[in-house]
Structure formats: structure tokens, C-alpha cells
Image (cartoon, rainbow, N blue to C red):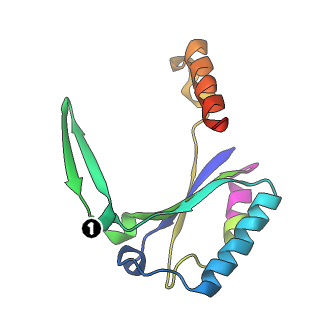
């Protein structure tokens, strides 16, 4: 199963405080372990929301809202995409992770939808189209 691991923002990450050399080194070793184990599919850190935008949808209208955004503890500062056998394995890998922030931090693990999760709502043609797009993305 695939999971997205969401690293929650902190006041420091939202202020643009960069991690120490030691933390960058520790996270690099951890990421290398994930890759070697065949777990990590992708992973990146994100700039603070002061550099971001939100697009609010309401029917046909679109409103663009400039960052920064409030509720720091609800924001995402980085992510990983992992392939694991189950949620327990994801939790075990997360317990091995160095604290990704300079202070107390939280990480959320969420299962990614698979085609079967959509049942009959997703037709074989739609699945085929999705597979073609995934192959195109992987080929870049």
C-alpha cells in the first residue's frame, strides 16, 4: 500500500529557519535507509507558506489567496511518498526517523487511494487512462 507521510509545519519552518547541518545529515542517512529498503518513492521539503498561494473553489469562481497562512500546526512543511505492506510498517519506519524539525513536531501518515477503493465508480477505461498518465510521468 502507498502512504503519504506529511511533516507538519512549525513556527520555525514557517519563519524559514533552515535545519542544521547535523539534521540535514541525519535525514540524508534516514532517507538512504528508506531507499535501500524499497520504501521511499518520493520526498521533499516545502518552502514556508509565505511563498505560497491557495486557490479557493466555489462553483465556477476561483479566488487566489496569498500566503502566509495561519494555523501553523495544520500546515505541511514536507512530505514522503512510501510503499509499505501496511500502516504498522509505516509507523515503525516513522519511529526510526530523526525529529524532522528543530523543536517538537508532528508527522501524519495517510493511506493513498488505490483504484479498487473507488469500486464501480471507476471504469476500466478510466483506470487505463490513469495507468497511461503514470507511465508518462515515470518516463520523464
Residue sitting at x 76%, y 48%: 85
- Quadrant containing the C terminus is top right
Magenta residues, start to end: 84-91
Say which of 108 and 64 sits in front. 64
Assign the magenta stretch its main secondary structure: helix
In this rendering, the answer to whether 38 lies above or below 130 is: below
Q: Position of residue 50 (x, y in %)?
A: 29, 67
Q: Can I make out residue 79 in this image?
A: yes
Residue 63, image quadrant:
top left
The structure residue drawn at horizontal position 21% and vertical position 53%, both measured from the top left corner, is: 65
137 vs 127, nearest the viewer: 137
Specify the quadrant of the image occupied by residue 26: bottom right
Q: Badge 1: few (under 14), some or many (20 or more) residues near its Cα, within 10 Å?
A: few
* Residue annotated with mark 1: 70
Please state if 110 lies on the left or on the right of 85 as rendered: left
Give above or below for 73 relative to 131.
Answer: below
Secondary structure under the numbered disc 1 in the rendered image: loop
Is residue 96 among what the camera can see? no
Amino acid at each position: 500500500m502507498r502512504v503519504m507521510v506529511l511533516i507538519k509545519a512549525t513556527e520555525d519552518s514557517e519563519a524559514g529557519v533552515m535545519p542544521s547541518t547535523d539534521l540535514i545529515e541525519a535525514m540524508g542517512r534516514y532517507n538512504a535507509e528508506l531507499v535501500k529498503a524499497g520504501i521511499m518513492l518520493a520526498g521533499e521539503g516545502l518552502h514556508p507558506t509565505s511563498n505560497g498561494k491557495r486557490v479557493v473553489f466555489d462553483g465556477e469562481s476561483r479566488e487566489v489567496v496569498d500566503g502566509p497562512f495561519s494555523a501553523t500546526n495544520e500546515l505541511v512543511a514536507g512530505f514522503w511518498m512510501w510503499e509499505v505492506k501496511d500502516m504498522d510498517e509505516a509507523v515503525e519506519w516513522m519511529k526510526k526517523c530523526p525529529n524532522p524539525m528543530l523543536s517538537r513536531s508532528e508527522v501524519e501518515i495517510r493511506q493513498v487511494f488505490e483504484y479498487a477503493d473507488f469500486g464501480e465508480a471507476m471504469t476500466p477505461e478510466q483506470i487505463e487512462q490513469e495507468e497511461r498518465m503514470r507511465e508518462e510521468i515515470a518516463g520523464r
